[in-house]
Image (cartoon, rainbow, N blue to C red):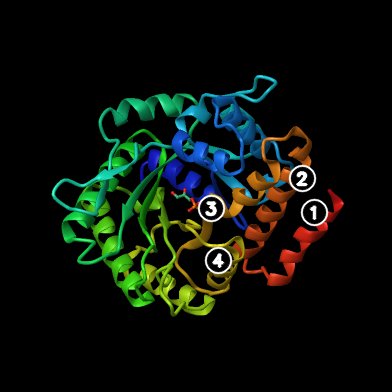
């Protein structure tokens, strides 16, 4: 293996170091603005900056968080005292990363399906991001389950784009997080989620192989295999853990250092419970960890509501969620730990 590849592998392994995972703070401006409006904060660039500053300056989260995924705007922003965010994170031992796709758009000729864009000019953008301190990237493909979908065309097209993205990242010395997210919207049973996830991952790893991407220097960001959100018969925690791991064993080479999960629309508690159940399984070929957005930040944003006077309580909420998610990543989470939150609230 060349030294470049070794450096990629070292970074990928650092991102899934013991007890640690990734914080996805890469909501696009449109998504972050929507989240701010939900808690009645005017969605300005400064409001987005203030919330991210709150997050990045929360003490102690680096014990559980190895890296943070940023959005382009955030990578270019600084703390109130003028330290660029990527530098602030690096000073705290947290690896800065960047979302580089430009979003999922309708796939031509395929009603109801999407393809993720962002390949044009990507080589130059990666060079700039690397210069600015980013060490890893993220690209998210979105797969929808519905009547007659996903089609093979949609799976192939998204997998091809993920392959092109990942190859360009590795060329630039950046670790690609490869994220093909199968959405859990719908009333389908868990079997359908399982089959779709296996087919999706199969396409993705074939493309990665064909496009000469080194498995050692990437992380897979995967969905958990669950019942559709509107399915009347919801699979329990053990079944979700078992089906998810089975889908990964079918498709993900052992050379991949880690699989990190997204939280999707799960409650904070479910996101921790599912991760915990999978972390307790011994003998897996890859590290299992998290790359959560909402399940780490939701409570903190709701507590903050844009008020300076809520800052300490909002940071305590993030510390709480990071601690519990870190515990789940080690297989040491229990639902009783959720009560800590009431103690946090009482103390603030
Ligand atoms: P959620 O954990 O909120 O699903 O976000 C993770 C993410 O980055 C999806 O791309």
Label 4 environment density (alpha carbons within 10 Å; few <14, some 14–19, many ≥20): many
Residue receiving disc 2:
313
Q: CA distance from mark 4 to mark 2?
A: 26 Å
Which of the labelled discs sits on residue 275, or is there none?
4
Badge 4 element = helix
Comparing marks 1 and 3, which lies closer to the viewer?
1
Question: Which sits earlier in the primary sequence, circle 4 or circle 2?
Answer: 4
Q: Are marks 4 and 1 in contact (CB under 8 Å)?
A: no
Asked whether mark 4 and ligand 1 are closer than 8 Å, the reply comes as no
* Residue drawn at x 60%, y 64% as measured from the top left: 272
- Viewer-proximal residue among 10 and 90: 90
| Image quadrant where residue 55 sits | top right
Residue receiving disc 3:
292
Give the x, y percent position of residue 63: 68, 49
Give the x, y percent position of residue 266: 52, 62
Q: CA distance from mark 4 to mark 1?
A: 25 Å
Question: Which sits earlier in the primary sequence, circle 4 or circle 1?
Answer: 4
Badge 1 element = helix
Which residue is outermost to the right? 347
Residue receiving disc 1:
345
Give the x, y percent position of residue 275: 55, 66
| Image quadrant where residue 129 sits | top left
Label 1 environment density (alpha carbons within 10 Å; few <14, some 14–19, many ≥20): few
* Residue drawn at x 39%, y 74% as measured from the top left: 246
Comparing marks 4 and 1, which lies closer to the viewer?
1
Lateral position of residue 246 relative to residue 275, left or right: left
């Amino acid at each position: 293996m060349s030294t470049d590849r070794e450096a990629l592998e070292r970074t990928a392994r650092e991102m899934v170091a013991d007890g640690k995972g990734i914080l996805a703070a890469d909501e696009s401006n449109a998504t972050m603005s929507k989240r701010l409006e939900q808690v009645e904060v005017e969605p300005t660039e400064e409001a987005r900056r203030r919330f991210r500053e709150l997050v990045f300056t929360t003490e102690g989260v680096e014990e559980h968080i190895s890296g943070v995924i940023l959005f382009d705007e955030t990578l270019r922003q600084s703390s109130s005292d003028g330290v660029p965010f990527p530098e602030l994170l690096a000073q705290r031992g947290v690896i800065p990363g960047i979302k580089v796709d430009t979003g999922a758009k309708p796939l031509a000729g395929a009603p109801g399906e999407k393809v993720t864009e962002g390949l044009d000019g990507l080589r130059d953008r990666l060079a700039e991001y690397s210069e600015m301190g980013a060490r890893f990237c993220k690209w998210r493909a979105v797969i929808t389950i519905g009547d007659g979908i996903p089609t093979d065309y949609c799976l192939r097209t998204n997998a091809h784009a993920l392959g092109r993205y990942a190859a360009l990242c590795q060329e630039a010395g950046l670790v690609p997080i490869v994220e093909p997210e199968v959405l859990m919207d719908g009333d389908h049973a868990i079997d359908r989620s399982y089959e779709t996830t296996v087919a999706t991952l199969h396409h993705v790893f074939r493309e990665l192989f064909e496009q000469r991407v080194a498995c050692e220097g990437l992380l897979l960001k995967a969905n958990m295999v669950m019942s559709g959100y509107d399915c009347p018969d919801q699979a329990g925690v053990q079944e979700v853990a078992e089906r998810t791991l089975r889908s990964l064993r079918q498709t993900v080479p052992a050379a991949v250092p880690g699989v990190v999960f997204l939280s999707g629309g799960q409650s904070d508690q479910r996101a921790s419970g599912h991760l915990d159940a999978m972390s307790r399984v011994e003998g897996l070929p890859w590290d299992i960890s998290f790359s959560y957005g909402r399940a780490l930040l939701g409570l903190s944003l709701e507590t903050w509501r844009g008020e300076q006077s809520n800052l300490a309580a909002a940071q305590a909420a993030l510390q709480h969620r990071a601690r519990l998610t870190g515990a789940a990543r080690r297989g040491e989470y229990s639902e009783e730990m959720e009560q800590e939150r009431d103690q946090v609230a009482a103390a603030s």
